[in-house]
């Protein structure tokens, strides 16, 4: 072992290996991290990034390999041990106890000690101000936005004097403004000599803030480059998937047809203290992708739940395939024609413990079975066709959905919903958390669907909205502020203003 | 009239203590996310061990300690299944109840009909006991009732105003978050499961040493189940558990009262049913009321494991 000098790495991973059953999540991964640098860890879904980071943070135990912290070997049996050594992680799913306050979450380990409370809270406020992590220490976590929760997570680590901070897809739940301020925090941490590692799928983020880029593919570390040496997004995309990917999507023109869905004066949800969406009017026509976008929490979630028939509406009428429904009758509507791809593909969209075939039958039981029988063979054939057409990888049609990666699971759901030949396809955040290749495949499928159906896309990803949409509606505080066609740069600026609640046309 | 009221009140308190103690214990366990449906079994075991230790030693402290500890140890069995092996907590709890019922009915056979070794009689508290009506109702009770009076605020303070209590509530809400914060989830859950068992064991000891001294098969008569319902009624708050337990005790007392005065307004069997009907009514009310604020621990019954 070399002598520990100032220039030696703060953390060195050597030949880290981790298996989950038959799956080799990490294979002999070697990586070194220096103090005062920001690292981006890239890779497709299921490449082993989260596993590697969880090993660093003490959540998982490696099956082989060594970790050296400042030159001496370490082995973390729990997150507590890693944190005590200065390594902390902000997980994709925030590790916050929702009913407790911000301060209680930060002080959880020690527990609040009476009398010292005011001092602790002052300390938290000071820390928050120093890093620009503005959040009220006395607010219950359940009242906070995703961005604020993330700040609490960072404060938790800083309060415990973490020197190496790991972030698993930190930007996935953030708005544009929040992403910018998160990156400011990254830069300040770097200036103070701390090490920042973040996992991401978004290439532009990598270019914006990282000093060094590491790419993982199928459990292995395949390349490490200084950010300055990367010339284009294409370089990075190629490193990630190992082939040239097209980032601009072909969008063949399709004739716009009649209105399939017309929403008039929708408000809801019914029975809530406060309406989450109000007086929403729009129509979606056959042959177009109509997008509803906005900063998360402006009523899109509730609107789409109501349109999908999952939650009751308070008022308004919906006209679908030339039939008008009142708010109450829309929810009780039966019959086909509408397919829905929910945001939560793991819980709402599919069932872990079911095989691919069983999952494929979930929304198509009318086609594959009756009260007393199930047409298993027919379902298996249809599933096999979907697996082939959408190149769904993992376990075969008799494998469990639980073993599919995010992208493959989304493709299965997409294939299932499209096989219903809907007149209207509602897709909610269809590429959230997917890698470049899977995103592209989902996009292509949505664009193809325009030929026979109307597509209602609900997304917070502006790039996705601009790439796919024919028209974009921007929601702010429960209302559609405007519907923009988004063909020119001026439109894009307008959409950004609308998302911030500005620029409403009078 | 006043005497009747004092009489009913005194019996009501007396009849509520076992449910109260068991409820307190179960609140602690459930706050940490451990659903233990074995309360009935732990109470029976506590009652039997307390009675047996009383007969063997004649020492009231040893008898109470034996009953309490027996409940705690049985709870650790549930802890092993629920925390370490991560099996379905409902099944494990039900098994515990069945085990407790079977074992006590078998091992308790020789004790049936034997004079109790320890009788914890009502001890009037000097001064307080002389307050009209109130004194009769609250301060002419068993020492274990006084212990329950003290445990209620202690439990409440522990859960809501100490660092340990914060950890307990946090584990019950989101074990993974607590683990990530560097706290030993397993230790807290074992501790709370054990504490829950102590409560049930103490409740059992109260029944066999104080309420109706001596061992009788199935002497808890479903009070363990009432306690589980009362946890929900109390919305996992020890202070509110007092109200639930007193309601239960009150209905039981009414039944005794009508028997004593010899009037049968309603058949005695209907009165005996009332506490359980109340429990069912409470469950319905808590869950369908307009301001439906449940307040249960989010991770109740959810096992924790770090990998996977």
Image (spheres, coloured by chain):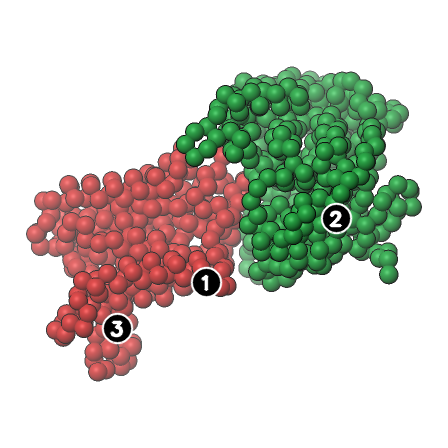
**Which residue in the protein does label 1 denote?**
B289
User: Which corner quadrant of the image does residue A386 belong to?
Assistant: top right
The residue drawn where x is 55% and y is 35% is A363
Looking at the rendered structure, the secondary structure element under dot 1 is loop
Look at the numbered discs 1 and 3 and tell me whether their residues touch, using CB distance below 8 Å: no
**Figure chain in red:** B
Q: Nearer the viewer, residue B174 or A303?
A: A303
Res A283 label: 2
Is residue A471 depicted above or below A371 in this figure? below
Res B9 label: 3
The residue drawn where x is 48% and y is 41% is B185
**Figure chain in green:** A
Query: Could you tell me which chain the residue with mark 2 belongs to?
Result: A
The residue drawn where x is 44% and y is 51% is B31
Q: Mark 1 Cα within 10 Å, few/some/many (few <14, many 20+)?
A: few
Query: Could you tell me which chain the residue with mark 3 belongs to?
Result: B
């Amino acid at each position: 072992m070399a002598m520990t000098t100032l220039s030696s790495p703060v953390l060195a991973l050597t030949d880290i290996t981790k298996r989950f059953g038959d799956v080799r999540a990490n294979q002999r991964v070697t990586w070194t991290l220096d103090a005062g640098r920001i690292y981006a860890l890239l890779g497709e879904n299921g490449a082993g990034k989260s596993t590697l980071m969880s090993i660093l943070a003490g959540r998982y135990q490696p099956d082989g390999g060594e970790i050296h912290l400042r030159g001496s070997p370490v082995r973390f049996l729990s997150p507590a041990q890693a944190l005590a050594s200065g390594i902390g992680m902000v997980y994709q799913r925030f590790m916050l106890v929702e009913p407790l306050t911000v301060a209680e979450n930060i002080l959880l380990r020690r527990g609040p000690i009476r009398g010292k409370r005011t001092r602790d809270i002052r300390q938290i406020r000071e820390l928050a101000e120093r890093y620009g992590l503005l959040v009220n220490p006395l607010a219950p976590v359940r009242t906070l936005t995703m961005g604020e929760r993330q700040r609490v997570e960072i404060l938790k680590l800083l309060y415990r004097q973490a020197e190496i901070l790991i972030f698993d897809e930190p930007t996935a739940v953030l708005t544009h403004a929040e992403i910018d301020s998160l990156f400011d925090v990254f830069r300040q941490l770097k200036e103070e000599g701390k090490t920042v590692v973040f996992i991401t799928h978004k290439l532009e983020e990598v270019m914006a803030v990282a000093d060094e880029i590491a790419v993982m593919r199928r459990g292995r570390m395949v390349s490490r480059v200084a950010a300055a040496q990367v010339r284009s997004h294409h370089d990075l995309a190629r490193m990630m998937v190992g082939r040239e990917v097209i980032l601009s999507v072909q969008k063949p023109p399709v004739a716009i047809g009649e209105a399939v869905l017309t929403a008039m004066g929708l408000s809801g949800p019914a029975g809530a203290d406060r309406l989450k969406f109000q007086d929403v009017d729009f129509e979606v026509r056959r042959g177009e992708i109509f997008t509803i976008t906005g900063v998360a929490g402006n009523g899109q979630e509730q609107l789409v739940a109501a349109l999908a028939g999952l939650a009751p509406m308070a008022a308004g009428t919906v006209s679908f395939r030339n039939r008008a429904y009142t708010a109450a009758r829309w929810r009780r509507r039966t019959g086909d024609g509408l397919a829905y791809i929910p945001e939560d593909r793991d819980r709402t969209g599919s069932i872990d413990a079911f095989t691919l075939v069983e999952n494929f039958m979930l929304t198509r039981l009318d086609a594959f079975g009756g009260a007393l029988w199930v047409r298993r063979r027919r379902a298996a054939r249809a599933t096999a066709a979907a697996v082939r057409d959408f190149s769904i990888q993992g376990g075969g049609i008799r494998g469990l959905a639980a073993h599919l990666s995010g992208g493959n699971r989304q493709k299965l759901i997409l294939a299932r919903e499209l096989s219903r030949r809907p007149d209207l396809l509602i897709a909610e955040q269809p590429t959230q958390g997917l890698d470049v290749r899977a995103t592209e495949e989902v996009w292509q499928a949505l664009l193809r669907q325009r030929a026979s159906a109307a597509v209602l896309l609900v997304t917070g990803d502006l790039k996705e909205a601009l790439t796919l949409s024919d028209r974009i509606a921007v929601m702010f505080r429960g209302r559609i502020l405007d519907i923009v066609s988004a063909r020119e740069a001026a439109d894009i600026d307008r959409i950004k203003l609308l998302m911030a609640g500005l620029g409403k046309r009078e | 009239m006043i005497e009747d009221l004092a009489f009913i009140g005194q019996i009501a308190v007396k009849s509520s203590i076992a449910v109260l103690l068991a409820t307190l214990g179960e609140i602690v366990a459930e706050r940490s996310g451990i659903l233990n449906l074995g309360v009935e079994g732990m109470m029976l075991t506590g009652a039997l061990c307390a009675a047996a230790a009383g007969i063997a030693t004649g020492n009231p402290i040893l008898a109470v300690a034996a009953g309490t500890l027996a409940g705690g140890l049985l709870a650790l069995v549930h802890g092993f299944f629920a925390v370490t092996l991560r099996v379905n907590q409902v099944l494990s709890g039900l098994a515990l109840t069945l085990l407790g019922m079977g074992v006590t009915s078998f091992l308790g056979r020789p004790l049936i009909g034997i004079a109790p070794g320890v009788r914890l009689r009502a001890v009037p508290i000097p001064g307080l006991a002389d307050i009209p009506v109130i004194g009769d109702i609250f301060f002419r009770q068993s020492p274990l009732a006084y212990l329950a009076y003290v445990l209620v605020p202690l439990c409440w303070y522990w859960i809501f105003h100490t660092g340990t209590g914060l950890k307990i509530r946090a584990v019950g809400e989101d074990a993974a978050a607590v683990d990530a914060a560097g706290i030993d989830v397993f230790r807290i859950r074992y501790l709370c499961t054990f504490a829950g068992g102590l409560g049930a064991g103490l409740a059992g000891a109260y029944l066999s040493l104080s309420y109706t001294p001596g061992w009788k098969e199935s002497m808890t008569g479903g009070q363990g189940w009432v306690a589980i319902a009362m946890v929900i009624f109390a919305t996992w708050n020890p202070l509110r558990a007092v109200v639930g337990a007193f309601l239960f005790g009150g209905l039981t007392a009414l039944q005794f009262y009508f028997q004593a005065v010899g009037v049968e307004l309603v058949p005695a069997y209907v009165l005996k049913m009332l506490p359980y009907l109340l429990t069912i009514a409470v469950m319905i009310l808590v869950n369908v009321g307009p301001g439906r604020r449940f307040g249960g621990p989010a991770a109740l019954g959810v096992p924790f494991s770090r990998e996977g």
